[in-house]
Image: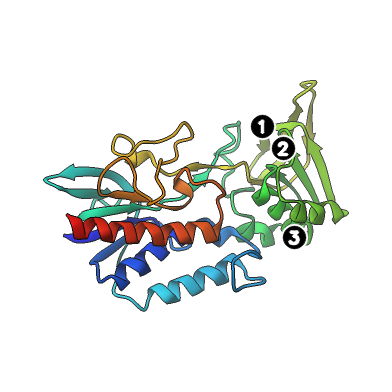
């Protein structure tokens, strides 16, 4: 029986684990990996104390800090949470289950699929969801980036220094911060296709093309590319919480200012929640708040 189980190993989950351990709570953190979406950030320039740091470097510092405390870890995905006799039972993909008196959900988000022909067939054979991980494999090639937010523009900026040509496919308009948008506009090998949507991924053994459609005219063209980086947003990893905690229309867990969900004893933090502005520093702060609120709950109950 744990005092607290934390679901998720991103900045919110790791911060919650450190705060829980400092309160001497018997804590288990269950995560598929440690770092979450922060691992995919090629450059973090707005985390206080670091003028510039890569996502991998920042996560390494988080892990080093967490390792100073007695925190149990389980590398798996959570599939179910059930309430039983006043406590919670958490079931994992590895078929193990764990019990706790309180829960912090910090499971973040998962990449949004394009849901077009060829996407799943060419996953790992030219289709990628992590430019930081896979960009070096496409040196001197032509690639496409799908999306118009910060993650998409960051991927395009990173790839512009590696690939021969980068096609940026934006469904409606670019919504990224001006700083990163200006940087991409300065790159001479980036071609913008605003108002286009991807319709099919082509190839035989590997990706060889991306078919796109202009939304206004329905005119389709095919771009010859060897790599496609999907940065079209993400979906909250909250399915296992459905039925226990209240979700909003976007599938995010609704919380109050104390990180409490609608279910007593279940707290939530980070990108899986309805807190606006999905930033590393905000996720970390929310993780600290959730752990402290869980500690207060345990004292009272």
Q: Nearer the viewer, residue 121 or 287?
A: 287
Going from the N terminus, do you reach mark 3 or mark 2 first? 3
Going from the N terminus, do you reach mark 1 or mark 3 first? 3
Relative to residue 71, is residue 203 depicted above or below? Answer: above
Residue 105 position within the rendered picture, expressed as x and y whole percent measured from the top left: 36, 51
Mark 1 → mark 3, Cα distance in angstroms: 23 Å
Q: Nearer the viewer, residue 48 or 232?
A: 48
Residue 115 position within the rendered picture, expressed as x and y whole percent measured from the top left: 57, 32
Going from the N terminus, do you reach mark 2 or mark 1 first? 1
x 74%, y 37%: residue: 173
- For mark 3, does the 10 Å Cα neighbourhood hold few (<14), some (14 to 19), or many (20 or more) residues? some
- For mark 1, does the 10 Å Cα neighbourhood hold few (<14), some (14 to 19), or many (20 or more) residues? some
Q: Nearer the viewer, residue 295 or 223?
A: 295
Mark 2 → mark 1, Cα distance in angstroms: 6 Å
Kindly tell me whether residue 219 is visible in this rendering.
yes
x 83%, y 45%: residue: 191
Residue, far left = 85
Q: Mark 1: which secondary structure?
A: strand
Question: Circles 3 and 2: CB distance less than 8 Å?
Answer: no
x 74%, y 60%: residue: 139
Mark 3 → mark 2, Cα distance in angstroms: 18 Å
Residue for badge 2: 210
Would you say 11 lies left or right of 210 here? left
Question: Circles 2 and 1: CB distance less than 8 Å?
Answer: yes
Residue for badge 1: 200
Kindly tell me whether residue 30 is visible in this rendering.
no
Indicate the quadrant where residue 9 lies.
Answer: bottom left
Relative to residue 85, is residue 63 depicted above or below? Answer: below
x 57%, y 45%: residue: 123
Would you say 187 lies left or right of 72 here? right
Residue for badge 3: 139
């Amino acid at each position: 029986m744990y005092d607290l189980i934390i679901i998720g190993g991103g900045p919110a989950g790791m911060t919650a684990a450190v705060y829980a351990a400092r309160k001497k709570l018997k804590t288990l953190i269950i995560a598929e990996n440690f770092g979450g979406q922060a691992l995919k950030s090629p450059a973090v320039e707005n985390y206080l104390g670091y003028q510039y740091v890569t996502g991998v470097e920042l996560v390494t510092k988080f892990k080093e800090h967490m390792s100073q405390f007695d925190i149990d870890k389980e590398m798996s995905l959570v599939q179910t949470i059930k309430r039983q006799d006043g406590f919670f039972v958490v079931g994992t993909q590895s078929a193990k289950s764990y019990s706790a008196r309180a829960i912090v959900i910090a499971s973040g988000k998962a990449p949004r699929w394009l849901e077009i022909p060829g996407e799943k067939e060419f996953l790992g054979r030219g289709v990628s969801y992590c430019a930081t991980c896979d960009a070096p494999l496409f040196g001197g090639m032509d690639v496409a980036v799908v999306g118009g937010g910060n993650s998409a523009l960051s991927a395009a900026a990173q790839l512009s220094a590696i690939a021969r040509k980068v096609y940026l496919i934006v469904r409606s308009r670019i919504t990224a911060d001006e700083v990163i948008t200006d940087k991409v506009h300065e790159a001479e090998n980036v071609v913008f296709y605003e108002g286009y949507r991807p319709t099919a991924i082509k190839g035989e053994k590997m990706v060889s093309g991306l078919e796109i459609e202009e939304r206004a005219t329905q005119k389709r063209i095919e771009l010859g590319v060897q790599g496609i980086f999907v940065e079209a947003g993400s979906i909250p990893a909250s399915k296992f919480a459905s039925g226990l905690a209240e979700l909003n229309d976007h599938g995010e867990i609704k919380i109050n200012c104390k990180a409490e969900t609608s279910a007593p004893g279940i707290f939530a933090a980070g990108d899986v929640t309805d807190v606006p502005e999905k930033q590393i520093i905000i996720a970390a702060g929310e993780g600290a708040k959730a752990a402290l609120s869980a500690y207060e709950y345990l004292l009272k109950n």
